[in-house]
């Protein structure tokens, strides 16, 4: 970048995005026109947060801030594309059917910085080569793709291109490539780039183009938290980037003892920007365990249980469920939130409280006609009333099970869910926002909790990668450890070849 560039390095919990937003406000306060400020974020959520904060403080409308976007959204609007010209989930399904491919689930990059993932390894690798600005053959040779045939990979590439050409649609990577080839240069005075450590080579090229005429560029990120190299992220670009560097010093998340532990992890990384930061003055501790059962998840506060891969969480989940503890896994409840809500609403009704119409509808949905409710009363009309009590539901709205326990009244709930909910009730944990969340380390990036349980086993693939270059795994477990505010519980590897902290 030929312009004035400032690089803001934010260790975990130091508020690098908050700092960036403060700088946006400063630019607006000193009179920089809103439409000459660019804010490029890795996720849609971050871009929206920045835009909404600026709109609220300076009484602006959305159209006043046209350049607060993800890179894909930026390219989309600059190229003047329409939604019908962009590959949709339906397009991907049709493609899979046409060419006999099983894509499974599709994440198209709309809110993940363009990290395109499916359950189809061939399509993933085709897209990854493009994100890395590599010819497919070079990517194939350098990636040691033992489970992928070259001919299969080439067929997948050609088939996808053929499909897009026939349908006259572009995918998310196409949009960036098109913008680099023919997209107009925006008239921007200042550009802000958030989460720069997660940008791939192709995205970095687009950032440089956007910033070409800007007088000032702010780049925010942390090379130590770069854990998306598998998706093409080019952290070395951030490390090499020229400009004035500022390291945010104070973490508002991690206690001192957790900070010290995390520094020992990240200190093993050979290729990084050296930086130091301070933990909070809160009491905290780091404890090592030989087995997950040694960690008491009933201790007060929020809990984040993390492992390197999803399947490593399966046994933990089974144990938590058997103990009757409510939890989320990857931010999803193991039982319907609608059912949890219905149970709580039913208890309120039977305690003499009024409940809202949506709660009544939830209750009725778990009752069979002529058993829990009279036929013809299942769907209350919105015009009837906003809040109800038990007596009027019994007298006027067909309820037959008033006063009965929920597990008797809700006859449409399966026995497995009933058994689990009863166990949860005993511990008084019925809630749609439980204190325990299970996640992969990658899935927890950006999150935090009072207490963290970190499993240090590695998959076979991760173990092989670490033997070649340990930097990436060190960064992953550094991110895991620094999710903790007060307590960090490290579970030693259960099998040979785990990550030793």
Image: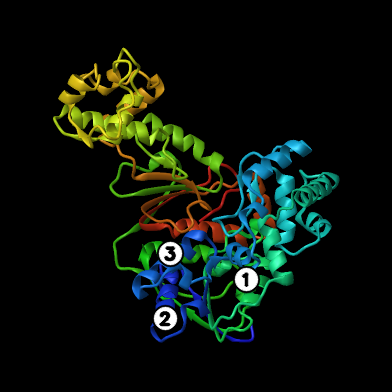
For label 1, the residue is 271
Q: Disc count in the image?
A: 3
* Label 1 neighbour load within 10 Å: few <14, some 14-19, many 20+: few
Rendering colour mode: rainbow
Q: Residues within 10 Å of mark 2 (few under 14, many from 20)?
A: some
Q: Nearer the viewer, mark 1 or mark 3?
A: 3
Along the line of sight, the residue nearer the viewer: 393 or 138: 393
Q: Which residue is mark 2?
A: 28
Q: Quadrant of residue 184?
A: bottom right
Residue contact between numbered discs 2 and 1, judged by CB atoms under 8 Å: no
Q: Which residue is mark 3?
A: 49
In this rendering, position of residue 233 left or right of residue 54: right
Q: Nearer the viewer, residue 39 or 199?
A: 39
Q: CA distance from mark 1 to mark 3?
A: 32 Å
Disc 3 residue crowd, few under 14, some 14–19, many 20+, Cα 10 Å? some
In-image side of 50 versus 210 (left or right): left
- Could you say whether the residue bearing mark 1 is in a helix, strand or loop? loop
- In the displayed structure, 136 sits above or below 271; it is above
Horizontal side of residue 323 vs 357, given as left or right: right
| Label 3 – label 2 distance at C-alpha | 16 Å
**Outermost top residue:** 370
Decide which of 107, 238 is in the foreground and name it: 107
Q: Is residue 86 visible?
A: no
* Front residue of 183 and 208: 183
């Amino acid at each position: 970048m030929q312009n004035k560039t400032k690089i803001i390095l934010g260790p975990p919990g130091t508020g690098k995005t908050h700092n960036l937003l403060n700088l946006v406000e400063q630019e607006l306060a000193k009179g920089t026109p809103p439409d000459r400020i660019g804010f490029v974020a890795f996720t849609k959520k971050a871009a929206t947060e920045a835009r909404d904060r600026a709109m609220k403080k300076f009484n602006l409308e959305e159209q006043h801030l046209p350049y607060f976007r993800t890179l894909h959204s930026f390219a989309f609007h600059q190229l003047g594309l329409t939604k019908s010209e962009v590959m949709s989930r339906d397009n991907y399904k049709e493609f899979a059917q046409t060419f006999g491919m099983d894509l499974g689930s599709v994440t198209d990059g709309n809110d993940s910085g363009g990290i395109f993932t499916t359950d189809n390894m061939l399509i993933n690798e085709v897209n990854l080569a493009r994100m890395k600005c590599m010819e497919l053959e070079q990517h194939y040779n350098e990636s040691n793709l033992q489970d992928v045939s070259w001919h299969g990979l080439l067929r997948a590439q050609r088939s996808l291109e053929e499909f897009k050409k026939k349908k006259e649609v572009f995918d998310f990577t196409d949009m960036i490539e098109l913008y680099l080839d023919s997209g107009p240069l925006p008239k921007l005075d200042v550009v802000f780039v958030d989460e720069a450590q997660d940008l791939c080579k192709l995205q970095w090229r687009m950032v440089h183009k956007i910033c070409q005429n800007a007088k000032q560029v702010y780049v925010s990120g942390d090379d130590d938290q770069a854990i998306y190299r598998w998706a093409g992220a080019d952290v070395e670009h951030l490390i090499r980037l020229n400009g004035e560097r500022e390291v945010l010093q104070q973490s508002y998340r991690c206690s001192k003892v957790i900070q010290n532990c995390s520094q020992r992890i990240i200190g093993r990384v050979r290729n990084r920007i050296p930086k130091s930061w301070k933990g909070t003055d809160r009491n905290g501790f780091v404890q090592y365990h030989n087995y997950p059962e040694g960690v008491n998840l009933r201790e007060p506060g929020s809990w984040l249980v993390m492992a390197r891969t999803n399947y490593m969480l399966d046994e933990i989940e089974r144990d938590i469920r058997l103990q009757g503890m409510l939890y989320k896994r990857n931010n999803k409840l193991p039982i319907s939130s609608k059912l949890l809500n219905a149970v709580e609403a039913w208890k309120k009704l039977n305690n003499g409280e009024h409940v809202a119409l949506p709660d009544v509808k939830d209750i009725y949905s778990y009752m069979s006609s002529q058993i829990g409710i009279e036929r013809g009363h299942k769907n209350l009309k919105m015009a009837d009333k906003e809040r109800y009590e038990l007596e009027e539901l019994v007298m006027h709205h067909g309820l037959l099970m008033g006063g009965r326990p929920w597990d008797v009244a809700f006859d449409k709930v399966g026995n497995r869910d009933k058994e689990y909910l009863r166990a949860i009730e005993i511990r008084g944990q019925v809630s749609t926002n439980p204190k325990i969340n299970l996640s992969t380390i990658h899935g927890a990036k950006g999150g935090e909790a009072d207490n963290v349980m970190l499993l240090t086993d590695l998959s076979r693939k991760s173990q092989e990668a670490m033997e070649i270059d340990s930097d990436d795994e060190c960064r992953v477990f550094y991110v895991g450890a620094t999710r903790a505010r007060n307590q960090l519980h490290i579970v030693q590897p259960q099998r040979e070849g785990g990550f030793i902290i």
